[in-house]
Image (tube, rainbow, N blue to C red):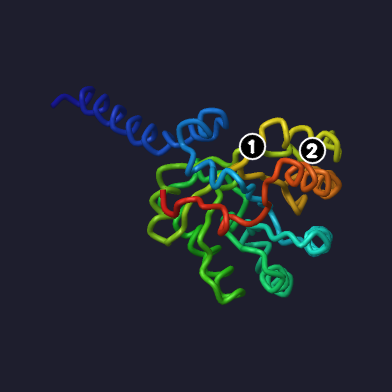
Amino acid sequence: MKPRTLLSVGAAAAAAVTAAHAAPVLSTYGPLRNRLLPRLAGTGRPDHVALTFDDGPDPFSTPNFLALLDAHDVRATFFLLGSMAARSPALVREIADAGHEIAVHGWAHRPLLLRGPRATHQDLRRARDTVGDLTGTAPRWFRPPYGVMSTAAHLSARRLGLTPVLWTSWGEDWTSRATPDSVHRTVTADLYGGGTVLLHDSDCTSFPAAWRSALGALPHLLDHCAAHGWQVGPLRDHGVAERS
């Protein structure tokens, strides 16, 4: 085979590998995911809404969410960054002791699409082991940073006993313009029974103090769910099938 032909074949093979690695990124598009991939979107029981938080634990902000949820007798699922959990082990245990479910958001908040299979697996394993050691319970769920999956992320999650789950509705509570009213409107515009809500209990990857918009919206969101007859709770009670 001629060198030019070999180069062409090599380039085509590399392109195919890249395309295969990036193919799951299509699930980032919410309407498509909710319609075609309900399990990955976190669609569960029609009488239940799963409440989830990303990017913690943060000793400055997370306790405010814990206090509010306790006052409303509501439990949620917290997708923790391993790097944040390692800095605040006592807070991780506090979240678990309060009855909330702890899940994995990776070790570092970096796009997995830009990481290879080995780095992806190491990131997820490090986060899973850190969270599991701190709580004494192996986490069940995994949500990738930015909600962007890759083939390597799917394979690594399966090998590590984690089930990927994204969301059906979010509050866009990470921006500088977010307010409690805007977060509530954005969440409820797409919310339905069986949906999974994404909010943030930390601003470690968001605009400073953006978490206050989510905290301010939360009581109104809980009232909205109650008015529709939807129970609010963690993913473990949501009826989402494990393993994708």
Numbered tag placed on residue 184 in the rendering: 2
CA distance separating discs 2 and 1: 14 Å
- How many marks on residues? 2
Note whether 181 is above or below 69 in the view shown: above
Give the percent coordinates (x, y) of residue 132.
55, 71
Relative horizontal placement of residue 80, taking residue 212 as reference (left or right): left
In this view of the protein, can residue 4 be seen by the observer? yes
Note whether 214 is above or below 175 in the view shown: below
Instruction: Report crowding for label 2: few under 14, some 14 to 19, many 20 or more residues within 10 A (C-alpha).
Output: many
Residue tagged by mark 1?
192
Amino acid type, label 2 = His
Amino acid type, label 1 = Tyr
In this view of the protein, can residue 118 be seen by the observer? no
- Rendered-image quadrant of the N terminus: top left
CB under 8 Å between callouts 2 and 1? no
Q: Quadrant of residue 147?
A: top right
Give the percent coordinates (x, y) of residue 58.
76, 61
Which element is circle 1 on?
loop
Q: Quadrant of residue 86?
A: bottom right
Instruction: Report crowding for label 1: few under 14, some 14 to 19, many 20 or more residues within 10 A (C-alpha).
Output: many
Give the residue displayed 61% in from the left and 46% down from the top: 47
Tell us which disc is closer to us: 2 or 1: 1
Which element is circle 2 on?
helix
Give the percent coordinates (x, y) of residue 142.
53, 54
Give the residue displayed 42% in from the left and 61% down from the top: 161
Numbered tag placed on residue 81 in the rendering: none
Mark positioned earlier in the residue sequence (2 or 1)? 2
Give the residue displayed 50% in from the left and 50% down from the top: 240
Most foreground residue, 193 or 95 = 193
Relative horizontal placement of residue 147, taking residue 26 as reference (left or right): right
